[in-house]
Amino acid sequence: MGRKVAVVGIGQTENKSHWDLTLPALYRLAAKRAVADARLDLGKIDAIVFGNSPEYFEGVNAPEKWCAEAIGGYGKPVFRVHTGGTVGGSTAIAAYYLVASGAFDRVLAISGNKLGDCAHAQLGLSTCYDPILGRSFAAGAIGAVAIQSSGYMAAYGVTEEHAAKVAVKNRTNALRNPYAHIRIPGYSMEIAMKSPMLSSPLKLSDCCPQSDSACAMVFAPEEMAKDLTDTPAWVLAAVGVNEGVNYAGRRWYQPIGLRKAAELAYERAGIRDPRRELSVIEVYDAFTYQEMIWYEGLGLCDWGEGKRLIDEGTTRMDGPLPVNPSGGVLCANSIGASAMIRKAEAALQVQGKAGERQVPGARLSLGHGWGGAIQFHTIMIFSKEKP
Amino acid sequence: MTDEPRVLAGEIRIPYKWTAGNVIGTFLATLRDEKKILGARCPECGKVWSPPLDACPVCHADIALADLVPVGPAGRVTSFTRIEAEVWGRPADPPYALAAVRLDGSDTDLIHLVLEPGTIEKLAAGMRVRARISQARKGTLLDILYFHEET
C-alpha cells in the first residue's frame, strides 16, 4: 500500500452560520488551523485536495476557483474532488493516496460548505436528482432517507423510540464538542418523541441541522511525521465504495456498499472483530435511523440488530464502543465538511486530542461517510501505533 | 460595527434541455402515446429495470430498444414516506406521499407520488397499488399522475 502515512494536522471551524466569513475565508480558517497543528504554514504545503458538495448550496460553480488562493494554493497543484455528502471523506482519501504513492509529501485535504447561503438547501439538494426521471419526485435528501428509514422499520421492527434514543445519545454527546451546532442541554426522549413530523418516519429530531463549516487535515509520510507532530494518527485503511442507485432488488436499508467497504478496510487494517477491536467510531448519522443502519453495514452486528446496540447502550460515551462522541452529523452538518469531520474526529481520538469528548485510551478508530443517492461510502481507520 | 447588510442577495436561472436518449426517450414517448409503462430487460442478466437505463449497472451490458418490455401498471409498495412539512420544491402540496413501487414484471423500484387521501393513510410495505395515467400527457414521468390503491 505504498508509504506509511500519518495525519499530522487537523483543523475545523465551528459549525454554525458564519455570516462574517465568505466561503474562501471559511476554508482559510480551517486550513490555517490544520497547518498550525502540523507546525507548518500554508506555504509549506506541497499539494491541496479540495472538496465541496453540490455547488447549488453556495450558488457558486467551481468553488475551488474562488477558494484556491485563500488556502495557500498559489503556485501549487490543486485537485478538486466531488462525491456529494461523502466528499469530505473522498477528499481525505485522495490526499492520503497522494502521500502514500510518493507523489507528494505534505498534502492538505480540505472540504466544506456554507449551507446558510442557500435559501432552501433541500431545494439545492433536489437538483442532484436525475433531471429526466428523478427530479419530479425529489424531496431533498430527506425524502430518500425517509423511504430508506420506513423500509428499515418495516423489515426489522425498529421503532420511533429507537430513533429517539439515537438522537438523545448524540445530542448529549454534542454538549462536549465546542464545534457542534446543536447543543441543547437536557435533550430528552420527550423532546425527541414530541418533535414535529416532517417526512414520515422522520421527525425534526431525527434530522441534522444546516450548518456552515470547513474541515482540513494534513497528511505526511512516515519520515516527516515525527517533525510535524508528537501524536501522529497512522492511517491503516482508506476505502471508498460506490453502491448502485436503484439496482435490481436493492434494499435501501441494507447498505451492501458499506459492508464491502468495511470488509476491505478491516482486511487492510488487520481487524478481525471490529466491535471489540475498535475503540471508537464516527458515523455519518445525518438521520437517526441511519446510525443503526450503518452499524449493520459496518459489520458491528448482523442486519437488523442495530437497534440492540442502541437498546443496550453499547455505543454510548460510557459504553464499550462509543459511536459519535462528537455528537455526529445529527448535531452539525455542512455536508461538505461532514464526512471529513468523521475522519478528523476519529483521528483526534487516537491522537488523544479530542478534548472533553475523548474516549479514554482510544487506540484504533474508524471514520465513515456517505453521500450521493445513499450510494457512496468512505471509511478511514486510524491507529495510535505505527503500523 | 454597523448594521449594514453583509450579504448580497441573488438567484440563478438558466433554462436547460436535458437529453433523454434513445432508450429512456422511447420509454417516455410510449407512456405519452400508448399509456404503457416499459422496463428494460438486460440482455445478459435478464433483470428488468424500470424506469429503464441505457446500460445494466450490474453486468455492464448495453441496453437497446429491443430490450424494452411492458411492466405494471400495478405493483406493490416496498417502502414509502408521508411528507407533511411545507418545504423542498415539492412535487405536490403536503400532505402527500412518495412510494417506492415494484411494478409487476420489474426488478427495481419506481419512486412516484401517492396523492389520494384514502391511499396515503393506508400506505404500508406490501400494499398493492396501480398507476393512474394522465389524460393530458407530455412525455414525462408525471404522465403517471400518481399511484392509488388497487381495487
Image: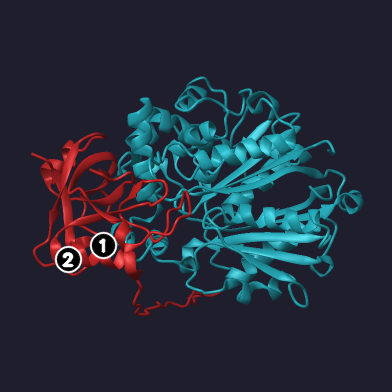
Chain colours: A cyan, B red
Please name the residue shown 38% across and 26% down the image. Answer: A156
In this view of the protein, which residue sits in the foreground, A83 or A343?
A: A83
User: From the image, which quarter does the C terminus of chain A lie in?
Assistant: top right
SS class, disc 2: helix
Residue A122 location in percent, x, y?
39, 58
Q: Residue furthest top?
A: A312
Q: Quadrant of residue A109?
A: bottom right
Residue A161 location in percent, x, y?
38, 28
**Label annotation for residue A173:** none
Is residue A17 left or right of A341 when viewed as pictured? left
A222 vs A21: above or below: above
Q: Amino acid at mark 1?
A: Phe
Disc 2 packing (10 Å; few <14; some 14–19; many ≥20) = many
A181 vs A351: above or below: below
Query: Does residue A304 appear anywhere in the picture?
Result: yes
In this view of the protein, which residue sits in the foreground, B103 or B63?
A: B63
Please name the residue shown 58% across and 69% down the image. Answer: A23
B2 vs A383: above or below: below
In this view of the protein, which residue sits in the foreground, A317 or A77?
A: A77
Q: Give the chain letter at badge 2.
A: B
Residue B46 location in percent, x, y?
37, 46
For label 1, the residue is: B27
**Label annotation for residue B32:** 2
Q: CA distance from mark 2 to mark 1?
A: 9 Å
Residue B58 location in percent, x, y?
47, 49
Disc 1 packing (10 Å; few <14; some 14–19; many ≥20) = many
Q: Give the chain letter at badge 1.
A: B
Q: Amino acid at mark 2?
A: Arg
Is residue B3 left or right of B150 when viewed as pictured? right
State yes or no: discs 2 and 1 in contact (Cβ < 8 Å).
no
A167 vs A29: above or below: above
Please name the residue shown 87% across and 53% down the image. Answer: A228
